[in-house]
Image (cartoon, rainbow, N blue to C red):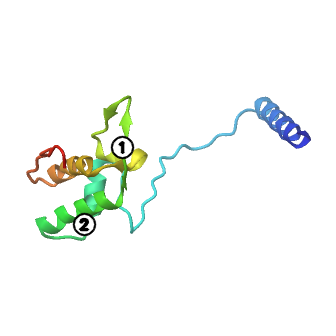
Amino acid sequence: MTRFLGRVFFVVVLAAIMGRFGGVEAGVYNLHLQTDNVPDYTDLESFVRSATDLWETPQEKCIAIWRWGRRSRRQTSCAADEGRTIWDPILHFNSYGAMNCGIISALNIPPWLQLGYRARYVELGGH
């Protein structure tokens, strides 16, 4: 408990000093971390570009999107926001990641459309 109070006192004193001498100027940056082993999930365009850059044929690009969809999720019950299914692939991969095979099939469609390919989602009940 004494240690906790000491830390609280330190923070209060530090805040008082900073208030007296003015705030510290700091730049604001939109940092972006990108690696060579995971696609860029910043937005749909970045995801499609980074996931398919190494591939040349339409078939290879479609398979690359499908593979990253499989790798970037957990096979569990679908994540929902206020009881509604989340249909945004970037939001799903960045924030949730939990979905079943039906939802991942639907989330593959926006990247394929971004590539200029035709795609549609057919829901098979009872699968």
Say which residue appears at 25% left-offset and 66% top-offset. 53
Position in image of residue 89 (x %, y %): 29, 46
| 66, above or below 88, in the image | below
| 18, above or below 37, in the image | above
Residue that carries the numbered disc 1 in the rendered image: 91
Q: Give the Cα separation between the discs numbered 1 and 2.
A: 22 Å
Q: Residues within 10 Å of mark 1 (few under 14, many from 20)?
A: some
Q: How many marks?
A: 2
Q: Is residue 127 left or right of residue 71?
A: left
Residue projecting furthest to the left? 118
Q: Quadrant of the N terminus?
A: top right
Q: Quadrant of residue 48?
A: bottom left
Observer-nearest of 84 and 64? 84
Say which residue appears at 23% left-offset and 60% top-offset. 66
| 126, above or below 73, in the image | above
Q: Which numbered disc, 1 or 2, marks the residue closer to the eye?
A: 1
Position in image of residue 90 (x %, y %): 33, 47
Q: Amino acid at mark 1?
A: Leu
Q: Is residue 45 left or right of residue 62?
A: right
Q: Amino acid at mark 2?
A: Asp
Residue that carries the numbered disc 2 in the rendered image: 53
Q: Residues within 10 Å of mark 2 (few under 14, many from 20)?
A: few
